[in-house]
Image: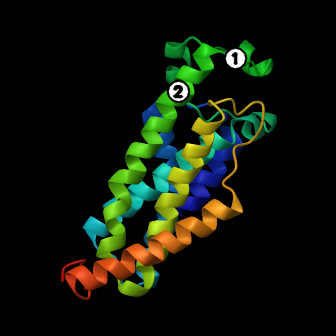
């Protein structure tokens, strides 16, 4: 039901006034997917759901930062209007796809917001059943890698869409697998609650 609400909202709403408005959209569009994963993994409880929401919202915000140009081509702006106004970036600049210090500032703010959520959700990996820990960590660290890619091009997502390279993806997978292996060795086998 929430996903249908987000779909209908996408057809009707093309601008979001405040960061809270964007977060409210994510509650319907992104967070239900994470909660479904928890249910399928028989690991759903309130604490895990909160952590999952942070990862899913952070990942969607990271995608919004990555896809500013593509979204604008479809007539949508997911960067909060409040953030844009406070940075000094207006709709006319959007139309010209203008990259300037105001746009960089707005992007810095939104990238930091996404990063904060993703890092806050990372403890979910430790709290999941062993067979899901690597995948959950990859979701969060994949989002962080997108944000790093945005930073590497100095936030100029008009010039090109920031991408996470195949090598980085492989590195993230190996790192997540190795981290889980080391954790099990040093703390003992993690239970589904992340407690040895």
Q: Front-most of 80 and 195?
A: 195
| Mark 2 touches mark 1? (CB < 8 Å) | no
In the picture, measured across the screen, residue 98 lies left or right of residue 55, that is right
Q: Which of labels 2 and 1 is toward the front?
A: 1
User: What residue appears at the point 37 percent right and 85 percent down from the top-left corner?
Assistant: 130
Using the image as rendered, state which of residue 153 and residue 102 is in the foreground: 153
Q: Relative to the observer, which residue lies in front, 162 or 26? A: 162
**Which mark identifies residue 17?**
2
Residue 49 placed where, x, y %?
Answer: 34, 66
Report which quarter residue 96 is drawn in: top right
Position in image of residue 160 (x %, y %): 77, 37
Element assignment for label 2: loop
Visible in this render: residue 192?
A: no
Q: Quadrant of the N terminus?
A: bottom right
Residue at the spot x=78%, y=31% of the render? 159
The residue that label 1 is drawn on is 91
User: Does the image show residue 194?
Assistant: yes
Give how far apart the Cα atoms at labels 2 and 1 are.
13 Å
Q: Residue at x 48, y 69 (%)?
A: 175
Residue at (36% x, 61% y) in the render: 122
Which mark is first along the chain, 1 or 2? 2
Q: Which mark is residue 128?
A: none
User: Does 55 sit above or below residue 84?
Assistant: below
């Amino acid at each position: 039901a929430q996903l249908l609400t987000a779909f209908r909202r996408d057809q009707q709403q093309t601008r979001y006034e405040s960061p809270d408005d964007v977060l409210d959209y994510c509650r319907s569009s992104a967070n239900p997917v994470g909660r479904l994963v928890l249910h399928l993994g028989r690991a759903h409880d309130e604490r895990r759901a909160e952590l999952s929401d942070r990862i899913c919202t952070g990942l969607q915000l990271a995608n919004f930062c990555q896809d500013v140009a593509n979204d604008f081509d479809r007539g949508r702006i997911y960067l909060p209007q409040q953030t844009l106004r406070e940075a000094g970036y207006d709709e006319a600049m959007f139309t010209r796809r203008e990259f300037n210090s105001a746009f960089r500032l707005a992007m810095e703010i939104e990238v930091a917001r996404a990063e904060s959520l993703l890092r806050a959700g990372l403890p979910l990996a430790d709290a999941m059943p062993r067979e899901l820990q690597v995948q959950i960590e990859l979701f969060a660290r994949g989002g962080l890698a997108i944000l790093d890619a945005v930073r590497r091009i100095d936030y100029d997502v008009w010039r090109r869409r920031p991408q996470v390279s195949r090598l980085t993806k492989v590195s993230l997978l190996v790192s997540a697998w190795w981290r889980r292996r080391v954790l099990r060795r040093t703390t003992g086998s993690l239970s589904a609650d992340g407690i040895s």
